[in-house]
Image (spheres, rainbow, N blue to C red):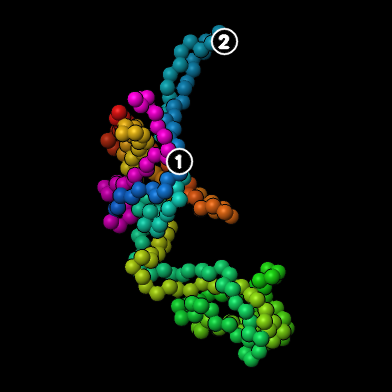
């Protein structure tokens, strides 16, 4: 038989923007925090002590209480950031820009010494530089000037054509640039706005810790999410960490805890 009160695993975090309080994004949409790694929930309290002439306190009392915590997850989207963090709407179907860090090319051995990038048709393009593959040394963009030596290039951003000096014939290079993808129903753009202090969505957060048919859950009806930490790793998945803080809100209920066996 399962021992009462045991919990195992990351748990589940479900968030629902409150449509009638705070500053909800358009079309408030409940969301699950995808591929959750861990949840931290702290039900804090300040303990105040009363002292007289002796060393030991004669009484203690609870002062301010708080609900704080954090969670780490691996799946993020513009919709999630819009609905839970910023309250700014998303635009579906288009993406302002996508960056390709290091598209590999080889400068032709003769003739025009030009390279056309893969996404040349998806204008507007933005140049983010060229480096040699074998050394990582950057080349110099001469702009409208003339090519006169190795280590120089120029680019036509309306055609996506990069031109190199003849001294770089057969050189292996990485081209860094961004382009504007064609409209796609899966694409989206979130443009953050500058709002007055205090602006932001209020969400209801449901933290569930299930285990073998039972478990414990906390329903926090009034929560603000804080920062988003984005941490990449060389040989692992990118993780996102955020903190949150709950409060009593207009109904005076800071949290509800429920348990099933």
Residue ranking furthest to the top = 54
Judging depth in this view, the residue of 16 and 117 nearest the camera is 117
Residue 237 coordinates in the image, percent (x, y): 51, 53
Q: Position of residue 188 (x, y in %)?
A: 38, 64
Q: Residue at x 67, y 75 (%)?
A: 139
Q: Residue at x 49, y 80 (%)?
A: 120
Q: Quadrant of the C terminus?
A: top left
Q: Which residues are magenta?
A: 1-27
Residue found at x 27% / y 35%: 251
Taking the magenta stretch, the answer to whether it contains residue 8 is yes
Q: Residue furthest bottom?
A: 111
From the top left corner, tell me how far across and down residue 223 is, in percent: 37, 41
Where is residue 241 shown, x and y percent of the image?
A: 48, 46
Q: Tell me, yes or no, whether the highlighted magenta stretch contains residue 87.
A: no
Q: Residue at x 72, y 84 (%)?
A: 167
In which quadrant will I find the N terminus? top left
- Label 1 neighbour load within 10 Å: few <14, some 14-19, many 20+: some
Q: Is residue 107 above or below residue 5?
A: below
Helix, strand or loop at disc 2? loop
Mark 2 or 1: in front is: 1
Lateral position of residue 128 relative to residue 77, left or right: right
Judging depth in this view, the residue of 86 and 116 nearest the camera is 116
Under tag 1, what secondary structure? Answer: strand
**Residue position for label 1:** 38
In the picture of the structure, the residue carrying the numbered disc 2 is: 55
- Is 230 left or right of 114, judged from the image as shown? left
- Rendered position, 261 above or below 243: above
Q: Which mark is residue 89?
A: none
How far apart, in angstroms, are the residues tagged by discs 2 and 1?
42 Å
**Res 195 seen here:** no
**Which residue is at the front of the view, 251 or 212?**
212
């Amino acid at each position: 038989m399962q021992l009462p009160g045991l919990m195992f695993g990351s748990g589940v975090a479900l968030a629902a923007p409150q449509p009638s309080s705070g500053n909800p994004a358009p079309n408030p949409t409940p969301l699950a925090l995808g591929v959750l790694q861990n949840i931290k929930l702290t039900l804090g309290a300040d303990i105040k002590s009363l002292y007289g002439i002796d060393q030991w306190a004669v009484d203690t009392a609870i002062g301010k209480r708080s609900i704080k915590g954090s969670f780490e997850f691996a799946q993020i989207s513009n919709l999630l950031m819009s609905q839970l963090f910023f309250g700014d709407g998303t635009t579906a179907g288009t993406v302002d820009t996508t960056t390709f860090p290091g598209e590999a090319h080889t400068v032709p051995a003769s003739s025009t010494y030009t390279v056309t990038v893969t996404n040349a048709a998806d204008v507007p393009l933005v140049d983010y530089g060229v480096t040699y593959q074998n050394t990582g040394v950057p080349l110099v963009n001469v702009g409208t000037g003339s090519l006169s030596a190795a280590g120089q290039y120029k680019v036509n951003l309306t055609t996506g054509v990069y031109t190199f000096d003849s001294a770089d014939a057969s050189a292996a290079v990485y081209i860094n640039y961004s382009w504007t993808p064609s409209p796609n129903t899966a694409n989206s753009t979130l443009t953050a706005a500058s709002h007055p202090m205090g602006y932001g969505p209020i969400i209801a957060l449901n933290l569930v810790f299930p285990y073998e048919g039972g478990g414990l859950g906390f329903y926090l009806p009034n929560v603000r999410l804080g920062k988003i930490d984005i941490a990449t790793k060389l040989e692992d998945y990118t993780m996102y960490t955020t903190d949150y803080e709950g409060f009593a809100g207009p109904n005076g209920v800071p949290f509800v805890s429920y348990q099933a066996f």
